[in-house]
């Protein structure tokens, strides 16, 4: 088994769909590793992920040659390299903007720390909340301390959990501190400069998509 794959510089911009599938492959590999599975073929990995083998091979080929002819992929080896590609081989420092119900729920979500995302603080403008802590111990600080916290804790990612009316102003403040990656839970469209990556999660849109499916499929008992 080679210690490192032969790196390959992608000739084109890697799409978000591809990087999302890398995360899916990693989840499947972690499950296989937990089951004691040592090797897996592209077909086996595809079956675990409900995809096709050609797509798996194409996605991985963007980043190097990980497989061994006649063997397939070594599970631990591929898992380690996918973590490196996704930047999960180091801890990412996270600050949550907004200490409402959603902010507290996100601060206490155990999956963040398990995957190396360290929530260092929540920020809010409500003086009554400043100094309180979430169940897991994440402290609420005032928004005026944003720049200091970003510099002190080397914040990598900002998580926006504020009402839509305040979202653009808050995101502008976050960007001004040098944070270049933002996960947004506020509704609506937000503007960011080209050097900042914004990923929005709109739960209402997801529910509306499910509602559409139910509306189009009709009543199965009808």
Image: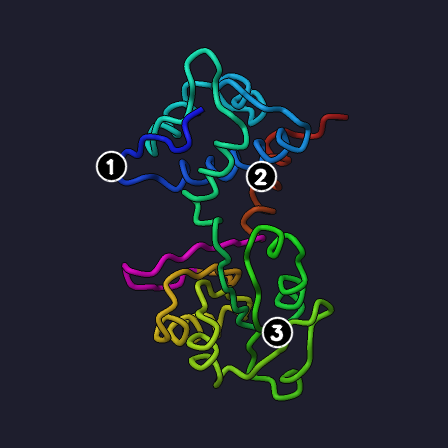
Q: Distance between the residues labelled 1 and 3?
A: 40 Å
Residue 196 in the magenta stretch? The answer is yes
**Could you tell me residue 4's position as x and y percent?**
39, 33
**Could you tell me residue 95's position as x and y percent?**
52, 69
Q: How far apart are marks 2 and 3 (CA)?
A: 32 Å
> Nearest the camera: 39 or 142?
39
Residue at the image position 39 percent from the left and 67 percent from the top: 179
Residue topped by disc 3: 99
Q: Against 41, is 10 above or below?
A: below
Q: Against 141, is 72 above or below?
A: above
User: Going by the image, does 193 lie left or right of 206?
Assistant: left
Question: For numbered disc 2, what is the local secondary structure?
Answer: helix
Residue at the image position 55 percent from the left and 27 percent from the top: 49
Question: For numbered disc 1, what is the local secondary structure?
Answer: loop
Which badge, 2 or 3, is on the more N-terminal residue? 3
Give the number of the mark in front: 1 or 3. Answer: 1
Residue topped by disc 1: 12
Residue topped by disc 2: 212
Q: Report the magenta residues as a range.
A: 189-203
> Based on the displayed image, in which of its 4 quarters is residue 132 positioned?
bottom right
């Amino acid at each position: 088994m080679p210690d490192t794959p032969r790196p390959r510089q992608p000739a084109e911009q890697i799409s978000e769909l591809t990087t999302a599938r890398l995360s899916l492959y990693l989840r499947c590999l972690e499950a296989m590793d937990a089951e004691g599975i040592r090797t897996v073929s592209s077909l086996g990995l595809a079956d675990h992920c409900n995809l096709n083998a050609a797509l798996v091979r194409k996605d991985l080929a963007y980043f190097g040659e990980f497989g061994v002819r006649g063997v397939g992929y070594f599970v631990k080896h591929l898992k380690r390299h996918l973590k490196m590609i996704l930047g999960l081989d180091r801890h990412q420092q996270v600050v949550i903007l907004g200490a409402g119900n959603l902010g507290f729920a996100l601060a206490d979500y155990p999956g963040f720390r398990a995957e190396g995302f360290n929530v260092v603080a929540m920020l809010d403008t409500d003086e009554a909340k400043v100094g309180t802590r979430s169940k897991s111990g994440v402290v609420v600080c005032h928004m005026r301390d944003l720049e200091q916290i970003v510099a002190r804790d080397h914040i990598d990612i900002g998580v926006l959990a504020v009402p839509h009316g305040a979202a653009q102003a808050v995101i502008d403040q976050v960007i001004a501190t040098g944070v270049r990656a933002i996960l947004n839970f506020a509704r609506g469209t937000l503007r960011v400069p080209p050097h900042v990556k914004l990923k929005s999660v709109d739960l209402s849109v997801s529910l509306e998509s499910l509602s559409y499916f139910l509306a189009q499929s009709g009543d199965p008992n009808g």
